[in-house]
Image (tube, rainbow, N blue to C red):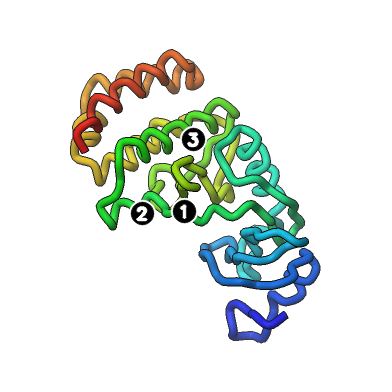
């Protein structure tokens, strides 16, 4: 195995990559407090491989992988190919993130609505992501379909739609006006109270569509 990350302390990750069945490391996709994500060739296919950091407080990636599998079955996350205590192998989502689109001035109503649809899929599956109040690096597009990644903070529950809309509104003034309105606050309270029911979701979606039509 030729590629190592991080370089200090020797090639500590090599054993994990070998145990995971990685044939070749193609590049670094991202890094966080729980792990690093590599683009690899894994058992004959391209994959995004999340590897647990040695200094992570989490003893295993298996709980996150099981939630990611459930999210993938709901259509909200990349397919999970396989996992163990030290790794999760997933279908690579190589499209831009919400952050990329916002920084490049390419964020459209279609991107926002696709993100909300993915958040609703998580709500419908009973998965509370835990980080969608800051959604910018957690939502990727492949190519137009929104996929939500990183489930290390996830728990059972719902409310992702409200958190996502509120998070996106910080960079979309017309959406911020909606989030600050009494109408949205009432809908959000009802959404939580009803356990994230579809009827209230559709009402929120209609309000969002009205407020982002001009961006």
Q: Which residue is mark 1?
A: 95
Mark found first going from the N terminus, 3 or 2: 2
Residue at 29% across, 50% down? 106
Name the quadrant of the N terminus. Answer: bottom right
Q: Which residue is mark 2?
A: 99
**Which label's residue is closer to the chain start, 3 or 1?**
1
Distance of label 2 from label 1 (alpha carbons): 11 Å
Residue 209 seen in this snapshot: yes
Bin the neighbour count of mark 2 within 10 Å (Cα to Cα): few under 14, some 14-19, many 20 and up: some
Task: Give whichever of 205, 126 is nearer the camera.
Answer: 205
Mark 3 neighbour class, 10 Å CA radius: few under 14, some 14 to 19, many 20 or more: many
Dividing the picture into quarters, in which one does residue 133 lie? top left
Residue plotted at (36% across, 54% down): 99
Q: Is residue 186 above or below residue 167?
A: above
Could you say whether the residue bearing mark 2 is in a helix, strand or loop?
A: helix
Q: Which mark is residue 178?
A: none
The residue drawn where x is 55% and y is 51% is: 150
The answer to whether residue 59 is visible is: no
Residue at image mark 3: 118
Q: Is residue 197 above or below residue 111?
A: above
Residue 130 percent across, percent down from the top left: 49, 43
């Amino acid at each position: 195995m030729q590629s190592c990350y991080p370089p200090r302390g020797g090639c500590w990750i090599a054993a994990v990559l070998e145990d995971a069945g990685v044939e070749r490391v193609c590049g670094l996709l991202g890094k966080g407090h729980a792990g690093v994500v590599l683009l690899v060739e894994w058992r004959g296919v391209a994959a995004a491989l999340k590897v647990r950091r040695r200094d992570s407080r989490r003893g295993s990636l298996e709980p996150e992988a099981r939630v990611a599998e459930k999210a993938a079955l709901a259509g909200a996350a990349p397919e999970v190919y396989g996992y163990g205590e030290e790794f999760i192998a997933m279908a690579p989502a190589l499209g831009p993130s919400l952050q990329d689109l916002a920084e490049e001035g390419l964020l459209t109503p279609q991107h926002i609505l696709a993100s909300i649809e993915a958040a609703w899929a998580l709500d419908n599956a009973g998965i509370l992501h835990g980080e969608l109040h800051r959604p910018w690096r957690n939502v990727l597009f492949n190519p137009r379909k929104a996929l939500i990644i990183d489930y290390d903070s996830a728990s059972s529950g719902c409310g992702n739609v409200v958190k996502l809309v509120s998070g996106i509104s910080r960079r979309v003034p017309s959406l911020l006006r909606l989030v600050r309105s009494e109408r949205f606050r009432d809908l959000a309270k009802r959404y939580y109270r009803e356990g994230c029911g579809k009827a209230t979701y559709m009402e929120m979606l209609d309000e969002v569509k009205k407020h982002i039509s001009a961006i």
